[in-house]
Amino acid sequence: MDPLFIAAIAVTFLAYFVKGFSGFGPALILIPTLTIIYDPITAISYATIFDAIAGVILLSIVFRKVDWKFVLPITALLFTGSYFGVMFIKQIPAEKLKLLIGIVLIVFIAILLSDRENHFEFIKKTGNSFLLSAAFIAGFIGGITGISGPILVMIFKLRFVKDVFRTQLIAIFTFGGLWRLFLYNNNGIIPELPLSIFVLIGVVLIALTIGHLFQTNLDEKRFNRYISIILIIPAVNILIEVFR
């Protein structure tokens, strides 16, 4: 078997173990790494397809816990941002946006590891206009880079406890992934897919199941620690990719 494909299997497993565990994160891990193996458009396409499949599965599990009055307006602005992002996908340098994502991740990791979330009480008190603006920006960045998570993950983690954080993100990112998949396909961005993609889809399903089972016994503090460790991987990957 091709060593590069084996590497793709390993990275895909890690990415969707993280998705099952945390409710977010696969694109953060998958896209920067797969761009070393495939071209950027293929990497973004694979990550979007996998995330749509994984999201639907996780959403079916947490569906009854979703606060739809909260999720739907945020999803609408995420959709709008993604639409404009896809329109600019070939015009705005993705490297600059990835650098911004990497910096945001590093700051967020530092906050979680230092247990200083309480220093950011102002984020908990922000109104809907702040969240909706953040959702639009996240969608715009996601449309261009395939990575829409960091801004919303940071805000949600500072506002919500583990279960609420995870559930709402699963719902928002599931619809966001499906919408981006539609936009990419409608704009002819999705390349012709090889049969080997079904192997990777199988890996996604296995990793997702294991990750979901693993997270059920973690308390809030340990969950924060694991999230921090997980995010170090994509942060380093993104910064290496930008500066190499």
Image (cartoon, rainbow, N blue to C red):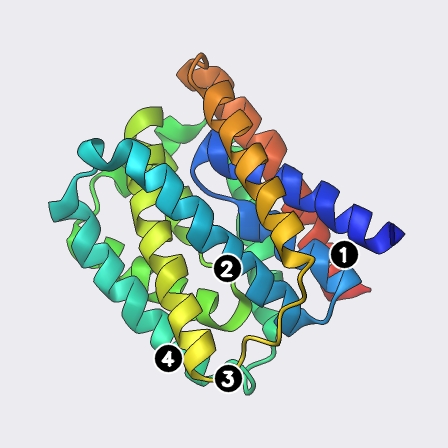
Residue at the outermost left position: 69
Amino acid type for the residue under numbered disc 4:
Phe
The location of residue 189, given as percent across then percent down, is 54, 80
Ranked by sequence position, the earlier of labels 4 and 3 is 4
The location of residue 231, given as percent across then percent down, is 59, 39
Of residues 30 and 101, which is closer to you in this image? 30
Which SS class for mark 2? helix
Which SS class for mark 4? helix
Ranked by sequence position, the earlier of labels 4 and 2 is 2
Residue shown at 59%/61% (left/top)? 46
Amino acid type for the residue under numbered disc 3:
Gly
Query: According to the image, label 1 marks what residue?
Result: 240
Question: How far is the residue under mark 1 from the one under mark 2?
Answer: 25 Å
Amino acid type for the residue under numbered disc 2:
Ile
Query: According to the image, label 2 marks what residue?
Result: 49
The location of residue 157, given as percent across then percent down, is 38, 35
Query: According to the image, label 4 marks what residue?
Result: 84
Question: How far is the residue under mark 4 from the one under mark 2?
Answer: 20 Å
Q: Give the number of the mark in front: 4 or 2.
A: 2
Question: How far is the residue under mark 1 from the one under mark 4?
Answer: 27 Å
Residue 101 vertical position relative to residue 105 in the rendered view, above or below:
below
**Neighbourhood count class around disc 1 (C-alpha, 10 Å): few under 14, some 14–19, many 20 upward:** few
Residue shown at 50%/60% (left/top)? 48
Question: How far is the residue under mark 3 from the one under mark 2?
Answer: 14 Å
On residue 188, the disc is: 3
Left or right: where 221 falls relative to 190? left
